[in-house]
Image (cartoon, rainbow, N blue to C red):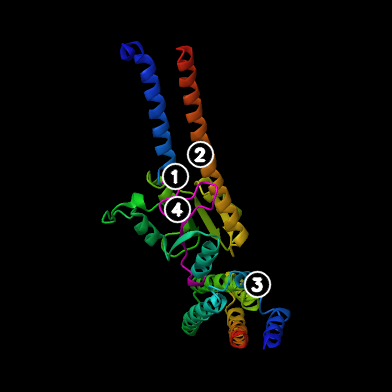
Amino acid sequence: TFLTNHKHIISLLSSLVYISLIDMAEVMRPEKLDMSNDTSSLGSPELLHVLAVDDSIVDRKFIERLLRVSSCKVTVVDSATRALQYLGLDGNHSFVGFEDLKINLIMTDYSMPGMTGYELLKKIKESSAFREIPVVIMSSENILPRIDRCLEEGAEDFLLKPVKLADVKRLRDSLLKADEIAFKNIMHKRELQANDIYSQLKRAKI
Amino acid sequence: MQRQVALIKQSLFDQGYLDEQFIELEELQDDANPNFVEEVATLYFKDSARLISNIEQALERGSFDFNRLDNYMHQFKGSSTSIGASKVKTECTMFREYCRVGNAEGCLRTFKQLKKEHATLRKKLEQYFQASK
């Protein structure tokens, strides 16, 4: 019968469909691209959600505005402790559903009372849930050992205060580019898999 | 009125009270957020009044805790930089230098000057925002 003779081909076709569906699901996963409220394609401006941490009220107002003007969604907190609470990393697991947070970038001041931005950076990089989130350190002091230490600990970038609009734009563009590259890689992988199955099908003379 | 605004602003820059950072702030203003700069300035003066009061208390005590004073000045310098308050920023830097070398007399002298610059800036900015309305 058709089915038994072409079992092999049917399983190849199923694989092709399966792989396409899996990769589409992978790409569309909300954590990768914040498309929860945005139905536009990758080409248009994405809404990056930034968590900004600074103990200075003036700087908080300033960074919030910088980020809003750059089309980012912003959450601002006044201490590293509050940042950890927001992320649900403070040991108090009453925070439900932190996977829905979708923070794309953390920007933190270096010198803060209590926990410093550097200590916050370390805690984030130690967390399996959040270590992939880029962390940018901001500081009014251009101290090379400090910069090195932060970059060594995995900071994405180190910005000198006062932060410029151009700095934020550059960050945003590089994050979106990283997402675009990830997307293209997935598409390419899918294409290779599809091509592989297609050539098998061709050999089977479908 | 426009001309008066321009004149006040020009003098603030010419006399070194404000630097480019203030322009950066103005560029973040738009029709939807027309009072952004004034809002930042209001926050700044409220916050710096708190810092001035803390520093005054610390100095009145007589015993100079240079670490503590430097800490306050670090905050003061930071917010002054963010708003573009150039002269105030310079005084903060000088104060911190005196803290670093443990010069109490220098601290007191600089602090007096700082308060003066701060008060002048406050008055001039109030005029500027008033004229801009």
Q: Give the magenta range.
A: A31-58
Dot 4: what SS? loop
The vertical placement of B80 against A179, above or below, is below
Which amino acid type corresponds to the residue marked 3 in the rendered image? Ile
**Pointer 2: what residue?**
A182
Residue of label 3 = B23
Circles 2 and 4, Cβ within 8 Å, touching? The answer is no
Q: CA distance from mark 1 to mark 4?
A: 13 Å
Dominant secondary structure of the magenta stretch? Answer: loop
Q: Amino acid at mark 1?
A: Lys
Q: Chain ID for label 2? A: A
Image point (42%, 50%), residue name: A124
Give the total number of marks visible in the rendering: 4
Mark sitting on residue A38: 4
Category of crowding for the residue at label 4, using alpha-carbon neighbours closer than 10 angstroms: few (below 14), some (14–19), many (at least 20): few
Q: Where, quadrant-wise, is the C terminus of chain B in this rendering?
A: bottom right
Label 2 to label 1, Cα distance in Å? 9 Å
Q: Between label 3 and label 4, give the one nearer the viewer.
A: 4
Q: Share a chain, discs 2 and 4?
A: yes
Quick check: marks 2 and 1 in contact, CB under 8 Å?
yes
Q: Position of residue B56 (x, y in %)?
A: 50, 83
Q: Is residue B34 magenta?
A: no
- Which residue lies under the disc numbered 1? A32
**Which is nearer the N-term, disc 2 or disc 4?**
4
Say which of B71 and A116 sits in front: A116
